[in-house]
Image (cartoon, helix red, strand yellow):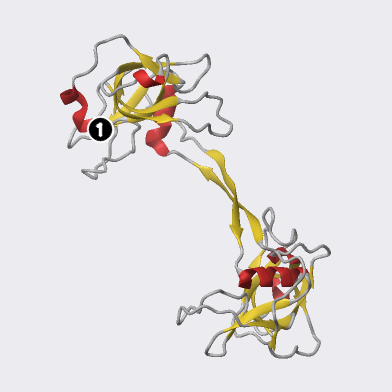
């Protein structure tokens, strides 16, 4: 007789994405507007060091920096790394090198992409120049990339007043993280049990607390939790909040109540929405049970069971 194979651990792609909006101070505004106009600006510190990209405060003295200077669009590679698998929204869609380039007239290096046919064509110390984007809007992407350059070096840093018509005053950056998420062995078992309308936690063999959702190990005792325990289905509201702001893509009318619910037999409370009762009648100690929708893989919400409220002493350690 052979032992049954353990269930396959769940995995799924996950995308975290949001637009990040920020206003620009005079230094960053001049830098990005300058890129739109085909001009690279830096700042000069009180010690005479020219920093590109420019910063608003000296990293050594913390004093505010406002002295803008123009540097050349040519420079030298100080270090590099080859990228043979470009990802979505990277500067180039063919293999390229990430490079730090110290532009002529600057004392610090700018990170960007270098268009090169192969890693053998890239070296520290090689000369490069800016390849400007065909359409420029006032963003770092106005530098399409760098390209190899064999011409003369540019001049030093020249003073610039930072004045441009229709200056860029704010930007919207799209932050995005793509990855494959796995909940692990313990939560895979928990999720699979939910699909069967069961709530299963794991008991610590040392302190005997039942964790729901399970974590695979007891955070108090530091030992693995492998003993599966079915809890609930009913539970007790330990604390709650009233939600008055409607979330995007969530088809729930406000106000509604989101609560911590200690399921019977569990050693800590989990989150759940309370329904089937006016929001202003939800209270600590309210006894509730899960409501499942057809084909749902988790409870849609919890509703009152009709039982008397739980005594405070029965759940005070779970608040």
- Residue 280 is left or right of residue 76, and the answer is left
Which residue lies most toward the left here? 313
Nearer-the-camera pick, 241 or 191: 241
Nearer-the-camera pick, 172 or 133: 172
Q: Quadrant of residue 299?
A: top left
State the residue position of label 1: 319
Residue at the spot 33% in from the left edge and 17% down from the top edge: 288
Nearer-the-camera pick, 190 or 52: 52
Which residue lies most toward the top here? 306
Q: Quadrant of the N terminus?
A: top left
Residue 65: % across, % down: 55, 79
Can residue 79 be seen in this snapshot? no
- Residue 190 is left or right of residue 162, and the answer is left
SS class, disc 1:
loop
Q: Quadrant of residue 162?
A: bottom right
Residue at the spot 78% in from the left edge and 64% down from the top edge: 136
Residue 272: % across, % down: 40, 26
> Does residue 65 lie above or below 94 as drawn?
below
Please rate how many residues cluster around mark 1, counting C-alpha atoms within 10 Å: few if below 14, some from 14 to 19, many from 20: some
Can residue 23 be seen in this snapshot? yes
Nearer-the-camera pick, 235 or 164: 164
Q: Quadrant of the C terminus?
A: top left
């Amino acid at each position: 007789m052979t032992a049954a194979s353990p269930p396959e651990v769940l995995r799924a792609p996950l995308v975290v994405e949001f637009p990040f909006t920020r206003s620009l101070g005079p230094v960053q505004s001049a830098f990005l507007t300058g890129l739109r106009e085909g001009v690279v600006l830096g700042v000069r510190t009180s010690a005479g060091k020219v920093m590109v990209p420019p910063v608003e405060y000296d990293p050594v003295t913390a004093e505010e920096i406002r002295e803008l200077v123009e540097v050349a669009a040519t420079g030298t590679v100080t270090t590099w790394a080859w990228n043979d698998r470009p990802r979505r929204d990277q500067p180039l869609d063919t293999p390229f090198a990430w490079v730090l380039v110290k532009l002529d007239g600057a004392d610090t290096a700018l990170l960007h992409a270098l268009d090169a046919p192969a890693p053998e064509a890239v070296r520290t110390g090689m000369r490069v120049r800016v390849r400007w984007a065909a359409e420029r809007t006032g963003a770092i992407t106005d530098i399409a990339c760098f390209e190899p350059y064999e011409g003369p070096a540019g001049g030093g840093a020249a003073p610039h007043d930072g004045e441009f018509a229709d200056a860029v005053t704010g930007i919207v950056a799209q932050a995005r993280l793509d990855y494959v998420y796995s909940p692990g062995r313990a939560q895979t078992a928990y999720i699979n049990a939910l699909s069967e309308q069961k709530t299963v936690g794991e008991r610590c063999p040392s302190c005997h607390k039942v964790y729901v959702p399970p974590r695979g190990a007891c955070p108090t005792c530091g030992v693995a939790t492998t003993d599966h325990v079915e809890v609930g289905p009913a539970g007790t509201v330990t604390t709650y909040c009233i939600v008055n702001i409607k979330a995007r893509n969530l088809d729930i009318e406000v106000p509604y109540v989101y609560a911590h619910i200690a399921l019977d037999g569990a050693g800590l409370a989990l989150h759940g929405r309370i329904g089937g009762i006016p929001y202003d009648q939800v209270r600590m100690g309210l006894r509730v049970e899960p409501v499942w929708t057809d084909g749902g893989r988790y409870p849609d919400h919890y509703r009152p069971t009709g039982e008397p409220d739980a005594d405070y002493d029965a759940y005070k350690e779970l608040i």
